[in-house]
Amino acid sequence: MDTTISDIVSAKTMLPVKTQPTCRQLCLFLSEYAAWLLGCGATCIRLEKNVNRIAEAFDKHVDMCIMPRHIHLTVSSHDRHISFTAISSIRCKAISFDINTRLSRLSWEIADEKIDFTQVQHRFEVITKTPPANKWLVLFLASAANASFCRLFGGDLLAMGIVFVATLAGFYLKQILTENKVDVRIVFIICAFVSSVLGATDGLFGLGTTPGVAIGTSVLYLVPGIPFLNSFSDMLDRHYVCAFSRFMDAMILTACLSIGLCGGMFMMNVDMF
């Protein structure tokens, strides 16, 4: 069958036209995207790469300033004749590797598949509504992991069992207090106190041969490792303000952990030195 020029033109007109966002639309989307990504525990360098990747896919230029509690973001056309600026607050959510990974994957899908902007908005909305992991499974796995740390530091089987119970009680209390919007610093003090009191039962009743390991590892689940690592990563990437903020948050939580631990040891009459 012969193909005429009119047939080719009509075929092209039947292809779906992908929606290209304006600077305003993309800026509002990226500001919300960045607020969620940083709030879920992403580093500043990951945030920059993902946002720039999305902006380049839609043929736009982006400038941003990342602060500890806000993100200032400007999207402009490549000729800089049109621009739009937005300021968004960081979404204070629990650290979620699931949401973090899915948001990063979305940026690659935009760059590789060139998906429509309306589809991007829909996928982003689905990701932000991702339900949290099963809290009972997390509770069990966290307790088992902390008991494994006890064994790693030389604890015997009885110490491992006590640490498992101490973590189970402390972590469950942490989940309850967090759901009731209690200040995270108070949560760390209370949970560390409860776990250390239960962890001290190994030495109090002479159940095992490693009571010091039991009480020392009973509060390890509270150590803010991710904020410490993120602060170091931000410092290497020269985001000094965010690095200092995250480091101070981690130090304050560590101090709260220490207060609860010392309070539990004092109550159980355990020698600190």
Image: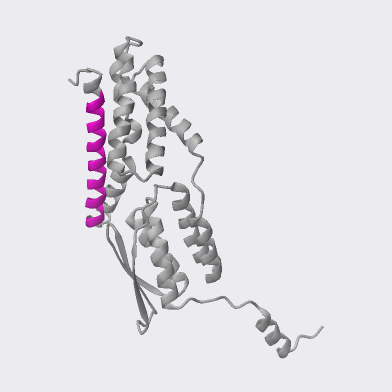
* Residue at (41, 64) in percent of width and height: 32
Residue farthest along the top direction in this orientation: 206
Residue 162: horizontal and vertical position, in percent? 38, 19
**Residue 52 visible here:** no
Quarter containing the N terminus: bottom right
Q: Quadrant of residue 154?
A: top left
Q: Is residue 9 above or below residue 110?
A: below
Per the rendered image, the range of residues in magenta is: 241-264
Residue 217: horizontal and vertical position, in percent? 32, 26
Left or right: 35 as drawn, with respect to 131: left
Q: How is the image coloured?
A: one colour
Q: Is residue 205 above or below residue 192?
A: above
Residue 36: horizontal and vertical position, in percent? 41, 57
Q: How many marks?
A: 0
Q: Is residue 28 above or below residue 168?
A: below
* Residue at (35, 10) in percent of width and height: 207
Q: Is residue 230 above or below residue 49?
A: above
Left or right: 33 as drawn, with respect to 226: right
Residue farthest along the left direction in this orientation: 273
* Residue at (36, 71) in percent of width and height: 62
Residue toward you, 94 or 237:
94
Q: Does residue 246 belong to the magenta stretch?
A: yes
* Residue at (36, 33) in percent of width and height: 221
Residue toward you, 255 or 144:
255
Residue farthest along the right direction in this orientation: 1
Q: Does residue 266 belong to the magenta stretch?
A: no
**Residue 8 visible here:** yes
Residue toward you, 151 or 172:
172
Residue 51: horizontal and vertical position, in percent? 40, 64
**Which secondary structure class fits the magenta region best?**
helix
Quarter containing the C terminus: top left
